[in-house]
Each structure stands twice: as structure tokens, then as C-alpha cells.
Image (spheres, rainbow, N blue to C red):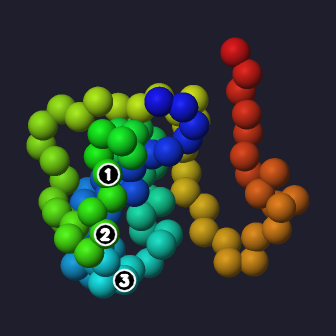
Amino acid sequence: MNGLDLSEQMILDCGFNGDDMNGCKGGNSGSYGQVFAGKLQGQGPHEKSYPYLESQPKLKCPTGNLPTYNSGAFVKTPLEDYFCTEEKMQQQVKCKLQ
């Protein structure tokens, strides 16, 4: 599996709380970043193994072991900036080459 193609559905299902993370009925996008960095610890399955379900989300985090996809990226802290520029984004992203 090539490329950074993490499962959006996993973030929707694991973050659902009916309030600020309300699946397909809206929500605060910054909250989903917190789920990815916190609860999912920056790891998740690839889109191919946990596909997007469009208007029929599960809205419940799977309890079984799903294969995680190591994209090489590590999410430590989610950032929310509605006035972000390319320069600001470059300052926030730190790459570690091995």
C-alpha cells in the first residue's frame, strides 16, 4: 500500500461522540485531529482495509485488531489554524529522515 492514505472512516467512527464529533452530521474538524493524535496515537488502518462508508458510518470504534498502516508520519499534537499559510505549515511539520 503506497502513499499516505489513512482511513478517514476510522477517525469518524472512533471519534464519534454526538456533540463536537458528530460523524456525517457535522462536527469540529479540530476535534478529529485530537482523536487521531490521542486515542489512535497517530496510527490507523489504510483506506483499503477500512474504507469510507459515506452516509452509513458505523460511529463505533472497532474492538478487533485492525492492521495499522505505518505511513512514516508521527502526529504528536494536532493544530487548528484557520489562517494557515504554506510557510506556517512548513514551520509546524518536522521531518525526521532515517
Q: Nearer the viewer, mark 2 or mark 3?
A: 2
Question: Residue 49's spot in the image, x, y percent?
Answer: 30, 39
- First of labels 2, 3 by sequence position: 3
- Please say if 42 is above or below 15: above
Residue type pointed to by label 1: Pro
Q: In the displayed structure, does residue 61 sit left or right of residue 12?
A: left
Quadrant of the rendered image containing residue 97? top right
Q: Amino acid at mark 2?
A: Glu
Residue 9, position as x, y percentages in the image: 32, 57
Kindly identify the residue that appears in the image at 20 percent across and 71 percent down. Answer: 56
Query: Residue at position x 31%, y 77% from top?
Result: 24
Nearer to us in this view, 3 or 12? 3
Residue contact between numbered discs 1 and 2, judged by CB atoms under 8 Å: no
Closer to the chain start, of discs 3 and 1, is: 3
Position of 8 compared to 78: left or right?
left
Is residue 10 placed above or below 67 in the rendered structure? below
